[in-house]
Structure formats: C-alpha cells, structure tokens
Amino acid sequence: MASLWQFFGLPDPEAVPASNRPVTAPQDSQKTESVQQNLAPIQEPVVTITNDVPEPVGVQSQPKPVPLGWRGPMTADGEPFHDLGAHASPPPRIPNRALRYVSPDSMNRLPTREIAKRIQQGDTVIVDLRPLVHMDTHQNVCRRELKQLSDDVGVGVFALDAEDKLLLMPGNNVVVDVNGHELGLIQLLKT
C-alpha cells in the first residue's frame, strides 16, 4: 500500500533505503533466494500533480476589454491596473454662469442693457436699491425699469427683503422655487 508521501510524489522520510538496511548472512541458498525476492524493490506507480487545468472544449479564454480611453498601466494578463496611490485631479472647469451684484451708479442709474445681456447668458443678478434710501420716487422708477426689463427678457423679479430693496432676477435656465420662500432672520430664529 502506498504511503501518503508517495501520493504526493515525495520520498518517505521514515523509510530506510536499501543500502542502509542490515544484511544478514544467509545460511542456505533457499533462504538467500527468498530474501533476495523480499528485498527486490516494489515498483509502484508514481503520481504527479500538476496545476495545469485543461480548458473545456469549445471555450476560448478572451481577454477582458480595456475601458475606452485607458492610458494607465496594464497587468501581465492584459487587464487595466488601477493604481490607487496615483491621483491626478481633472483640470479646473471655468464656470459659465455667475451671480452678479448691481447697485445704482453715482448718478443713481441702473445699467439695464448690461443686466439684460447677463441674464440672457444665464447669470443671476441681484439689484440692491438700498443706496437710494431717501429717494422713494427714484426707487420706484428703478423698480419699474426692472419690471419692464423682466417682461422683455422673460424672467421674473423676486424681492429678497420685506422692503423690496433687494431684488433678484434669475438668468436663463435658472430655476427658482417660489413655494418655499421663507426669508430673513426671523424664520431662522424660530427653528
């Protein structure tokens, strides 16, 4: 019977080689022949284990697809290798929209043409009429100009304070939530 060592194809460490066995002097020729037959090495089949696994018939191994535009390192198998230690940030994007703050100039006028251009580009404009604190009539004139501008451009005008001195005009494709319009510090203090 084969030992565990022979199953794995290794020599048995407990077995004594034939050259190191004690040899007794035979007393007669029959015993010598029987001893020689007993000392004859037993030939057992040698089993070798390999890691080669045959592929099923009709199935071919296909390399994994490389992602489109992959420029990183590859493994030996041809797969993309994601090195988590190498980090490259994308180039910064230049914004195409802005939030503009406009207040009346030194002659208390609003640049309505420039505001209309910026709104059509998508910029949101906040108009501050607080510098005209003692000129109620001129504040009303500026509000009418902004109302005419909003009708021409097609956007609404929203008051950001209770006195209608801070006005917001959203740019093209800017969404304004008109349902939840809780403004001011009083609403923050209540929560």
Image (cartoon, rainbow, N blue to C red):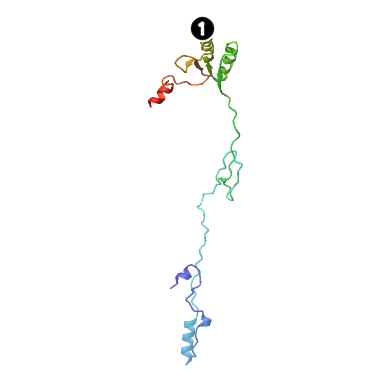
Q: Which is nearer the eye, 1 or 75?
A: 75
Neighbour tally class for label 1: few under 14, some 14-19, many 20 plus, Cα within 10 Å: few
| Local secondary structure at mark 1 | helix
Residue 63 position (above or below residue 24): above
Expressed as whole percent of the image width and height from the top left, the position of residue 44 reads 48, 72
* Total labels drawn: 1
Residue reaching furthest front? 134
Residue drawn at 55 percent across, 19 percent down: 101
Residue reaching furthest left? 190
Residue drawn at 41 percent across, 25 percent down: 188
Residue 147 position (above or below residue 4): above
Residue drawn at 57 percent across, 19 percent down: 121
Asked if residue 122 shows in the view, the reply is no
Expressed as whole percent of the image width and height from the top left, the position of residue 131 reads 54, 14
**Circle 1 is placed at which residue position?**
137
In the rendered image, the quadrant that contains the N terminus is bottom left
